Image (cartoon, rainbow, N blue to C red):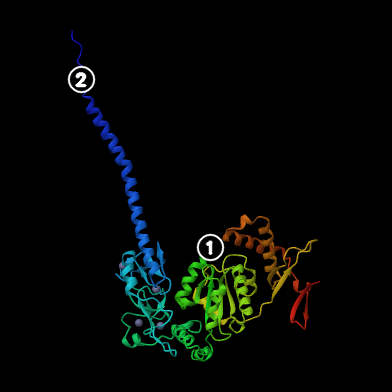
């Protein structure tokens, strides 16, 4: 009997063909996502390069953002947008597709005016449409502005006045800009144009020119450290550029204080003020630059220095009444108001020379600058305890929140233990009349 017939195996080429299919599909399923990912990232980097190219050539101060913090509409196509770019000088906001056109169409804040610049001619408002700050009020009808969910209403990028679309009339369009609330802190573009012209004519009588701006005019120069306070300085620089003339706002990591302070020499004598945004180290850096101005014979241009403390452990700032650390508790406009209201005091600064006492006195004596200030009482005790612990384990004190928690711990402990109780009875004040320098002595 014949055995059961088995189906004959197919030709070997058919098996290979099936294997080939399998390999092909496997390769496709692996390679296709890789290819798509690579293509997407290539496109993204090309777009980024293109955007950076626009940023570099632009007169605007464009910055990228992945998410706008408030409802935002593109200044060109008026669409609602979540991400895109914004100018940190004039405040324009735009989506990626409209960036190039918007960059050409809209002008940014002009730090100097065109023309011959003789005299201080007032300039008209510079209005931009849409994205007015929340809780703004119309200058014409005094009603709330920018509350509709669309691109609407105007803001002047110099005086920050806002107006409804329907309230904007020709009279307002042609009205001269008075630079608003912070006019005494802003360096007007026309002033810089006039100074430029005077320098060309070899005239240095800036006082006459400045007298037209009034006695209250005390221009403010911002020196911010963009790396201070977990990069908070970066955002502050933008906010100050919006409120002031961008020419008076410097990042000290890009322009050293001594260079930035040369702007004071274009201002009337004793009129300039400086706001340092950073830690005690940045303040010390700026004060050293001020000392250098004295050495250069620029005493008359020396500015008064205010501090906006960033980060933690800002003893000098705290002693001068500017607080221990700013984390956005008050708006930047309020910071400027505080600077306008601040009183000037003199800081005791010493040059300390340290000489090495060895057998062979080969090393050069070292020179340091010392700010002579101190505080007594619970806050000083807290700072001392914090400092002592940070010296022991510096790596544990890298977080701002943790540092604040340690301060809170010592503050609470002092409330219970009250080590500084009756301090006024334990301390005696001595006044050395010749130097007017109070000396405190513990009993
Ligand atoms: Zn658009
Ligand atoms: Zn701009
Ligand atoms: Zn204006
Ligand atoms: Zn109105």
- What is the crowding at mark 2: few (fewer than 14 residues within 10 Å), some, or many (at least 20)? few
Mark linked to residue 153? none
Q: Name the quadrant of the C terminus.
A: bottom right
For the question of whether residue 83 can be seen, the reply is no
Cα–Cα span, label 1 and label 2: 76 Å
Residue at the farthest top position: 1
- Residue name at image x 36 percent, y 84 percent: 141
Q: Which residue is mark 1?
A: 230
Residue found at x 35% / y 86%: 172
Percent x, y for residue 133? 41, 74
The one of 229 and 324 positioned closer to us in this rendering: 229
Q: Helix, strand or loop at disc 1?
A: helix
Nearer the observer, 386 or 413 = 386
Q: Quadrant of residue 286?
A: bottom right
Q: Badge 1, how many Cα within 10 Å: few under 14, some, many 20+?
A: few
* Whether the residue under disc 1 has CB within 8 Å of ligand 2: no
Split into quadrants, the picture shows ligand 3 in the one at bottom left
- On screen, residue 127 versus residue 211, left or right, reads left
Q: Position of residue 284 (x, y in %)?
A: 62, 71
The residue that mark 2 highlights is: 8
Q: How many marks?
A: 2
Residue 420 lies, in percent from the top left, at 73, 68
The answer to whether residue 4 is left or right of residue 235 is left
Name which residue lies at 34% across and 67% down. Answer: 99
């Amino acid at each position: 009997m014949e055995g059961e017939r088995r189906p004959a195996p197919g030709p070997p080429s058919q098996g290979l063909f099936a294997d080939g299919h399998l390999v092909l599909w496997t390769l496709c399923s692996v390679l296709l996502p890789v290819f798509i990912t690579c293509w997407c990232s290539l496109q993204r980097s090309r777009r980024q390069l293109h955007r950076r190219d626009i940023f570099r050539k632009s007169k605007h101060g464009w910055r990228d953002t992945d998410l706008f913090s408030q409802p935002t509409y593109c200044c060109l196509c008026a669409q609602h947008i979540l991400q895109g770019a914004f100018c940190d000088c004039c405040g324009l906001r735009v989506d990626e597709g409209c960036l190039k056109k918007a960059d050409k169409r809209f002008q940014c804040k002009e730090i100097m005016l065109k023309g011959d610049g003789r005299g201080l001619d007032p300039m008209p408002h510079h209005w931009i449409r849409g994205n007015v700050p929340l809780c703004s009020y119309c200058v014409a009808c005094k009603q709330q502005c920018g509350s509709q969910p669309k691109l609407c209403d105007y803001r002047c990028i110099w005086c920050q006045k806002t107006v409804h679309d329907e309230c904007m009339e020709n009279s307002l369009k042609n009205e001269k800009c008075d630079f608003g609330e912070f006019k005494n802190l802003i360096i007007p573009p026309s002033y810089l144009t006039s100074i430029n012209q005077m320098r060309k004519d070899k005239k240095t009588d800036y006082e006459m020119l400045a007298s037209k701006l009034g006695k209250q005019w005390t221009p403010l120069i911002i020196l911010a450290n963009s790396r201070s306070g977990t990069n908070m300085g970066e955002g502050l620089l933008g906010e100050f550029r919006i409120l002031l003339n961008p020419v008076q706002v410097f990042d000290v990591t890009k322009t050293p204080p001594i260079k930035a302070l040369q702007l004071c020499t274009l201002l009337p004598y004793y009129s300039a003020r400086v706001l340092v945004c950073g830690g005690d180290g940045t303040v010390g850096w700026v004060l050293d630059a001020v000392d250098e101005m004295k050495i250069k014979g620029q005493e008359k241009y020396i500015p008064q220095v205010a501090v906006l403390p960033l980060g933690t452990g800002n003893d000098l700032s705290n002693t001068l009444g500017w607080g221990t650390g700013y984390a956005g508790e008050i708006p930047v406009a309020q910071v400027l108001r505080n600077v306008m209201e601040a009183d000037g005091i003199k800081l005791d600064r010493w040059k300390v020379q340290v000489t090495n006492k060895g057998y062979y006195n080969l090393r050069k004596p070292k020179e340091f600058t010392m700010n002579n200030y101190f505080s007594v009482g619970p806050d000083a005790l807290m700072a001392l305890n914090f400092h002592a612990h940070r010296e022991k384990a510096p790596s544990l004190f890298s977080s701002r929140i943790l540092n604040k928690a340690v301060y809170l711990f010592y503050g609470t402990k002092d409330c219970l233990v009250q080590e500084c109780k009756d301090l006024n009875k334990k301390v005696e004040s001595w006044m050395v009349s010749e130097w007017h320098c109070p000396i405190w002595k513990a009993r």
